[in-house]
Amino acid sequence: MKTICYLDTEQELVLPEIGYQLLINYSEQIKKWGWICNFHAQSSVSFKKNLNFLHNQPSVATLIAVPCILGVKLNDADLLEFLKQLADTDGSSILPPAVVRVLNTKACRGAIMFGDALLPSECSLIVEELKKTSLCFQCAHGRPTTVALVDMVVLHKQIGKLGNWNRGSCGSWRGLSRHRPSLERATQRLGQ
């Protein structure tokens, strides 16, 4: 699922001081996901000299490697987005937003689509696996994947109100009619 891809040429990240501090503070979480950076420490002389301009001085880090999630290489913009999320959540973030996007995209693109041919055994396996999930009727993005065609409870109540319908009469209900099973009816239907 996740690998680390070393960049052909190292990428320089010029960050404001706050961004640089976030990069250092959350370096373990960042490295855990596969972003590997070199931090260029300022010398104490340079630090003292620029103390008055601390918030205006950009700091530099070098990006050496990025995560590769299911074959998709993440980049420096994804790292900065993750840093912002870490700052917003005080480091309690679990998944980088870019990882969530990749997983959601792969989940939908890899899904069974209308018109896909499946063996009966594959259908049975899918239904059995879906029974085990809590949100089996929505995709990874939260969109519904099924639409109810009829409310069975309401349908049964309506049919129950039609006493003759349930006893097998040949009456009609809203354009629907019921015929007793017969060879003549089967022949008629096959001829249609």
Image (tube, rainbow, N blue to C red):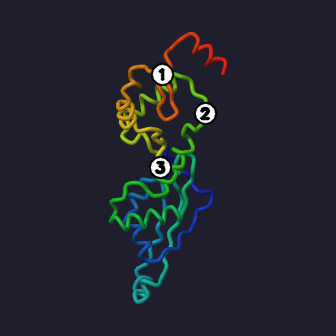
Q: Position of residue 125 (x, y in %)?
A: 46, 26
The residue lying furthest to the bottom in this view is 52
The answer to whether the residue labelled 2 contacts the one labelled 1, judged by CB atoms less than 8 Å apart, is no
Between disc 2 and disc 1, the foreground one is: 1
Q: Nearer the viewer, residue 64 or 35?
A: 35
Q: Which residue is mark 3?
A: 143
* Vertical comparison of 5 with 133: above or below: below
* Vertical comparison of 69 with 184: above or below: below
Question: From the viewer's perspective, is 48 left or right of 105?
Answer: left
Q: Which residue is mark 2?
A: 116
Q: Nearer the viewer, residue 38 or 159?
A: 159
Query: Which amino acid lies under the numbered mark 1 shown in the image of this protein?
Result: Cys
Query: Which amino acid lies under the numbered mark 2 shown in the image of this protein?
Result: Asp
SS of the residue under disc 3: loop
Q: Nearer the viewer, residue 20 or 125?
A: 125
Sequence-first disc among 3 and 2: 2
Cα separation between marks 3 and 1: 43 Å
Q: Which residue is mark 1?
A: 170
* Vertical comparison of 74 with 189: above or below: below
Query: What numbered label is drawn on residue 23?
Result: none
Q: Position of residue 127 (x, y in %)?
A: 44, 30
> Alpha-carbon neighbours of circle 3 within 10 Å: few (<14), some, or many (≥20)?
few
SS of the residue under disc 2: loop
> Alpha-carbon neighbours of circle 1 within 10 Å: few (<14), some, or many (≥20)?
few
The answer to whether the residue labelled 3 contacts the one labelled 1, judged by CB atoms less than 8 Å apart, is no
The residue lying furthest to the top in this view is 183
Q: Residue at x 47, y 42 (%)?
A: 147
